[in-house]
Structures are given as C-alpha cells and as structure tokens.
Image: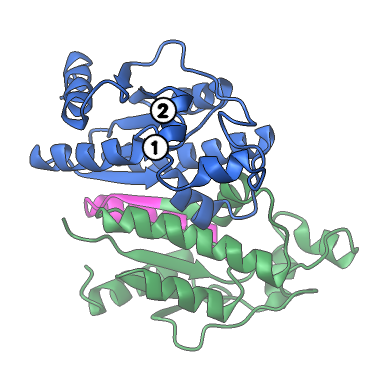
Chain colours: A blue, B green
Amino acid sequence: MNRGVTIWLTGYSGAGKTTIANHLHKKLRERSIVAETIDGDTIRQKLCKDLGYSREDRCINIARIGFVAELLSRHGIWVIVAAISPYRDARADVRRSIDQFVEVYVRCPIKECERRDIKGLYRRARAGEIKSFTGISDPYEEPIAPEIVCDTEKETIEESIGRIISGLQHLHYL
Amino acid sequence: MNRGVTIWLTGYSGAGKTTIANHLHKKLRERSIVAETIDGDTIRQKLCKDLGYSREDRCINIARIGFVAELLSRHGIWVIVAAISPYRDARADVRRSIDQFVEVYVRCPIKECERRDIKGLYRRARAGEIKSFTGISDPYEEPIAPEIVCDTEKETIEESIGRIISGLQHLHYL
C-alpha cells in the first residue's frame, strides 16, 4: 500500500485555503487520486469543540488534524488540509509525524484578507467581538521553507492550482 | 471505492476488546483486508486529552472515535474500534453515521474483569483512586441488539474470533 500525500494549506482566514482545497480535490480526482479534504472548521466542530484559541489550544487543534491526516495517508489516502494553523512549531510537529508532507503557504496580505472578509469575521474581530483572531489580535508565524507558496492576492485560482500541481510533480508525488 | 466495515467492540475494561482487536486485525490481513485498529486509550491520548469521564465527556469521546472511523471506512479502510463506549445512545449515534457498522458486544461479567484486572485499574477504582470507573462507579449500558456477541469468560480467543468472522460472513461483509 502506497502512502498518501498530505497537502497542508496554511494561511490567514480568507486567504483562499478552502477554495484551493476544493479545486485541488477535483484536480486530483481527475487523476484518479482518492483524496479527503479536512477543513479546520469541521475539525473544530467534530474533534475540538472543547478547544479555544490560546496558543496551547491552537497547537492541540493542529496536532489533532495531523493525527487524522496521518491515519488516512498511512492507508494511501491523500489528504488536503485547509487550516489556519498559525504556529510554526505545531506545523513542524505534524510534518515529523507524516511520511509525505507538503506544506503549502497560501499567502495573502492581511489587508487583502480583511478587504475580502468573506465570512465577516474580520469586521467582528475589529469590533472586539472575536478575541484572539489570527492576524488581528493573534500571531501568524509564516512558514520558513514551505514546499509550495501560492500568492492569492496576485494569482488566479487556476494559477495557484497549477503551482501546486507543478510542485507535487517536482517532488515526484505526481 | 468500496466502503470499509467498522467493527465496534464494546465492553468493560478487561473484557478482552484489545486482544480480540489484535487477533481480528491479523485474521483480516490474512484475507488481504486493510484494517486500522483504533484503541480507545490511544484516542483519549491523541484526540481527547481534555475530556474526562462524565456521561457527556464519554459521549463526546465516542463521537470522536466515530468521526475518525467514518472517515477511514468511507475510503474503504476497515476499522476495528476497541473502546468501552458505555452509552447506548452514543453508540447508536455512531451507528447512524457509519454505512457498514457492526457492533460486537465483548461480554464478560464485571466480577471476571475485576479478577483479571490486567492493568490494575479495578484495584485502583475500588480504592477510590479512579473515579467514574465503568462497572464500579459508572454505568455500562449493554447493547440491546448487537450484531455479534463474544462471551470471553467462556470462549477461547479463537472461538471469539471465529464467532466474529462467521458474523461478518453472515452479514455478507466477508
């Protein structure tokens, strides 16, 4: 049984992680690759309802996503994770636990994410209705050496997907 | 992609769930079936460190195991769960969420589990060192209509495994 690849999309809320995840999922399916998309919000709901947004809780959240991703990828399922996952150490821990791990930095300036504000969360964070909001009142630690970077302020979704597919080919996963 | 089968072993601590899980895993492998064993203790460590042993927390624990089992089985991986999972409603919720679900009641009288006391937990529970211990100071709700029952006080491990394999054949999963 070949191991699956875990493609870990990290970046601010509104940077485009979920959009990329959905498009990538389709692209992989076209290549007959079975993938599961794990969305940070779903995992919060299903596995982490107890957790808040402190550094410690966020790291536990990331570790739990990593645990599930490892289980799936161990059985040959590709996993696309879309989660802010703001802490470098927590992402590094996950990387160590997963055999074929590809970190994709979904880069978008916080100003642009706030301008988009698709879910209205930035407005609420600015109004103080949401505490510890990444980029506003909580840190985001940029990846230092991600395998792939998508620049969603400048690129179209097709360009971002193209970049990821090329990256996966370069890494010999495709 | 065929869905995997989730084989859910429920019963007291010390009833023999883990032993059955390990033997069953090997038996399935002999039939070229890829299975993942999910142990309640591991999940407590990896996904539920925050949870205690109240009714509510135990139900959340069971739901989280169910979430992971569903994810895996959806992709054709068989899942063997070994978890006390003492509450009927919580097990019924999991059953509803999983396509091919087989409940195996690993039955063993509490007296016999306590006599075995493999992990020394019953002694500690009796001494009051562990609160809310299933069968001693916390309820266990027996399955009403499990697909399979193993009677580990009377059966050898081979007999229990034989019973599960027959049950799976009867259900047309093997």
Residue shown at the point (63%, 30%) measured from the top left? A138
Q: Main secondary structure of the magenta part?
A: helix
Secondary structure beneath dot 1 equals: helix
Residue shown at the point (18%, 24%) measured from the top left? A159
Q: Residue furthest bottom?
A: B144
- Residue B165 is left or right of residue B130, and the answer is left
Determine the chain carrying the residue at label 1. A
Determine the chain carrying the residue at label 2. A
- Residue A54 is left or right of residue A125, and the answer is right
**In this orientation, does residue B27 appear?**
no
**Depth check, front residue: B96 or A167:** A167
Q: x%, y% of residue B148?
A: 41, 79
Q: x%, y% of residue A66?
A: 47, 36
Q: Which residue is mark 1?
A: A116
Say if the magenta span includes residue A147.
no
Q: Say whether marks 2 and 1 touch (CB < 8 Å).
A: yes
Q: x%, y% of residue A157?
A: 21, 31
Q: Which residue is mark 2?
A: A112
| Residues shaded magenta | B16-36
Say if the magenta span includes residue B25.
yes
Which mark, residue A78? none
Per the model, the C-alpha gap separating discs 2 and 1 is 6 Å
**Depth check, front residue: A86 or B174:** A86
Secondary structure beneath dot 2 equals: helix
**Depth check, front residue: B126 or A173:** A173
Q: Quadrant of residue B164?
A: bottom left
Q: Given the image, on which type of amino acid does mark 2 rest?
A: Glu
